């Protein structure tokens, strides 16, 4: 039987369901949300508008966006026990703390147990507002600072930077964070979204699906690229060292971080929207060398682009966080902040036409054999 059954390891190339949210053309390097090009959304939209688009399926009117934004801002509240839980595990990795806090919210907020679509939407809006609060509160608490209260007058991205740093960002800085969230908001059946759908297929609540997604994103093979890129940049040190670094990595058949993607054969379409932002932020922060190192690596990697080794979105995002002085272990939680609306709509879509996700594994263990009592072994 093992010779007749085809195994698609990692489910590569397998379509397990239909989905009307994001469309990825890896061969052409294209991405759209609900039919809208990521390029239009990244240059003309806001995270709040994109979150509405993903969850409800259409771009909002001005009135609909204002109502949705007001619901997001009103949801910037955490029960006091969540702060106590964060304090109790403050020395843990931020992804572990985030997962624990979201799981605790399911027990602390009665509405979290509701499982209809409207409840999923309401819980999804609340969690989208609460996740950045948890991440920022943890970073403050572990550094012996009091959590910064959210500012209802700030946008989602600007408020995130305010809660994390205690400084209100200027418009350009807030916009770059906003674009970063837009670019990470949704990306098809990636590992964390698929894992969330598996959980939702058992008819559990939304918090259960989000906890699963956070747990899956925490693995370095899924969410760790931005941190790895920043480690690489530090290792290279200067732009003039980039060519030798790349040459040595390729000679040893080792990966160059931030290049290549599971689905894209051409450049990740999201990458271009952070490239100029990194350059401008680096100049503003008095650290242009980070951008220069990145571009030197890009130049050194050009000969390998024909093999599908092109820049991905995480190549630039890590440097943005570095320029803000954000610790590396917060890079993946920031990814989670942006991905929240994508996880929410993936869970909703699974619920709409639910079937328990239960694939098969092909047994290749021992042939049938007789049980031997323990005294005779």
Image: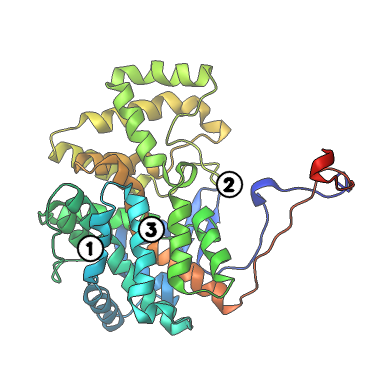
Q: Residue at x 46, y 70 (%)?
A: 345
Q: Residues within 10 Å of mark 1 (few under 14, many from 20)?
A: some
Residue found at x 45% / y 27%: 301
Relative placement, left or right, of 148 versus 3 is: left
- The residue indicated by pointer 1 is 83
Q: Mark 1: which secondary structure?
A: helix
SS class, disc 2: loop
Residue 38 location, x and y as percent?
41, 58
Is 21 in front, or is 229? 229
Mark 2 and 1 residues: CB-CB less than 8 Å, in contact? no
- Front-most of residues 131 and 157: 131
Question: Label 3: which residue?
Answer: 99
For label 2, the residue is 27
Residue 131: image quadrant is bottom left
Instruction: Tell me which numbered mark, 2 or 1, is placed earlier along the sequence.
Output: 2
State the SS at label 3: helix
Position in image of residue 107 (x %, y %):
37, 73
């Amino acid at each position: 039987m093992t010779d007749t059954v085809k195994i698609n390891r990692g489910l590569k190339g397998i379509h397990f369901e239909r989905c009307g949210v994001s469309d990825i053309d890896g061969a052409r390097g294209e991405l759209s949300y609900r039919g809208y090009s990521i390029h239009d959304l990244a240059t003309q939209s806001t995270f709040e508008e994109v979150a509405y688009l993903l969850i409800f399926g259409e771009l909002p009117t001005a009135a609909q966006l204002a109502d949705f934004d007001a619901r997001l801002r009103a949801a910037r509240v955490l029960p006091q026990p969540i702060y106590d839980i964060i304090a109790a595990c403050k020395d843990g990795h931020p992804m572990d703390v985030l997962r624990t806090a979201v799981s605790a919210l399911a027990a602390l907020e009665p509405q979290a147990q509701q499982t209809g679509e409207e409840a999923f939407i309401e819980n999804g809006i609340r969690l989208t507002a609460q996740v950045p609060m948890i991440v920022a509160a943890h970073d403050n608490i572990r550094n012996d600072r009091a959590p910064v209260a959210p500012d209802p007058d700030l946008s989602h991205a600007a408020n995130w930077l305010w809660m994390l740093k205690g400084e209100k960002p200027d418009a350009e800085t807030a916009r770059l964070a906003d674009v970063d969230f837009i670019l990470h908001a949704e990306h098809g059946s990636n590992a964390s979204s698929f894992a969330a759908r598996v959980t939702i297929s058992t008819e559990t609540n939304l918090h259960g699906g989000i906890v699963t997604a956070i747990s899956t994103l925490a693995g370095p093979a899924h969410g760790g690229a931005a941190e790895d890129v920043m480690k690489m940049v530090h290792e290279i040190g200067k732009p003039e060292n980039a060519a030798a670094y790349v040459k040595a990595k390729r000679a040893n058949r080792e990966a160059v971080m931030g290049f290549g993607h599971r689905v894209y054969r051409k450049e990740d379409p999201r990458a271009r929207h952070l490239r100029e932002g990194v350059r401008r932020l680096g100049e503003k922060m008095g650290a242009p060398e980070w951008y220069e190192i990145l571009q030197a690596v890009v130049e050194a990697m050009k000969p390998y682009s024909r093999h599908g080794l092109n820049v991905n979105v995480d190549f630039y995002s890590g440097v943005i966080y570095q320029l803000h002085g954000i610790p590396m272990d917060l890079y993946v939680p920031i990814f989670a902040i942006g991905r929240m609306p994508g996880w929410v709509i993936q869970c909703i879509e699974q619920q709409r036409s639910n079937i328990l996700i239960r694939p098969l594994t092909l047994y290749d263990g021992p042939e049938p054999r007789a049980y031997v009592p323990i005294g005779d072994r």
